Image (cartoon, grey):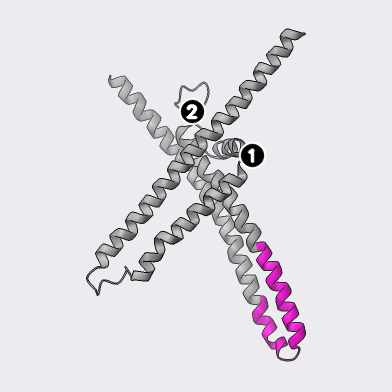
Amino acid sequence: MLCLVQRSAKICRNRLVGCLITSLYVLLLSTSVFFGFFSDSVNYLSITSLARDYETFHSKAAVLFHAVVVLIHGTVFIVLAVKFGKWSAGWNMGLVVSVLEEEEGEDGKGGIYGTNALSLSYWYGRGHEKRDLLMMLMFLVFAIATRMPCFYSRCSLSSSGNGVLYTGLYVGLICVGNVVKWVACVVSYYDCRARVLEKKDDVEIGSKAKGFAT
């Protein structure tokens, strides 16, 4: 019994360390994407500020130039937003892989984490990019919707005496949203994994059938 408890504690510790390592990779990747958003916004603001003096003398050319700048930076922003939605779905599945996936030959002791978990999540998610993007957009809208009542009610202000109630409601909505998101990620992981393993079994059965036929 004691050996079983020690083995379970070791597996949980290894899984926790693996999940933390994967989280660091996800943090690095997401930070780079947010830096892209920030640089695009700063570049747009700097260009428009430099064009203000030119606008007073050449209004038509300035309007055309501003329209081109808005088109370019708007396109970059939309592309980054779509890519971030797809990548965030893979990153979330990578965290799920770090917790649930077992490395072959290790009897579940090692687990998969880091770049291996992210690569495996990309492999599992191939062909489901549109569904994952819609799922991330849905949770983004849900997150914004759950935060709007707090901003509307000014839950940070306790002058009315209901600040604690509003804050508790705000935190509860965020927790519910996070739980639903991770449950959806786990369900998506098992669905994608089952489809990949099913295709793998079909390929192996087909190769064996060809071998028997020859």
Judge whether residue 20 can be spotted in this image: no
Q: Looking at the picture, how far across and down is residue 3, in whole percent?
A: 31, 20
In the picture, residue 81 is in which quadrant? Answer: bottom right
Count of labels shown? 2
Gap between marks 2 and 1, in whole Å? 23 Å
The answer to whether one can see residue 114 in this image is yes
The amino acid marked with disc number 2 is: Glu
Task: Tell me the SS state at disc 1.
Answer: loop
Instruction: Using the image, determine if residue 69 lies above or below residue 88.
Output: below
Task: Determine the residue positioned at 74% across, 88% down.
Answer: 59
The residue under the point 52% across, 41% down is 93
Q: Residues within 10 Å of mark 1 (few under 14, many from 20)?
A: few
State which region is magenta.
47-76
Where is residue 126 drawn, in percent x and y? 63, 38
Residue at 37% of width from left, 50% of height from top? 176
- Left or right: residue 65 versus residue 145 is right
Tell me what residue is drawn at x 26 percent, y 71 percent. Answer: 158
Looking at the rendering, which quadrant does residue 32 occupy? bottom right
Determine the image quadrant of residue 204. Answer: top right
Quadrant location of the C terminus in the rendered image: top right
Q: Nearer the viewer, residue 106 or 51?
A: 51
Q: Which mark is residue 3?
A: none
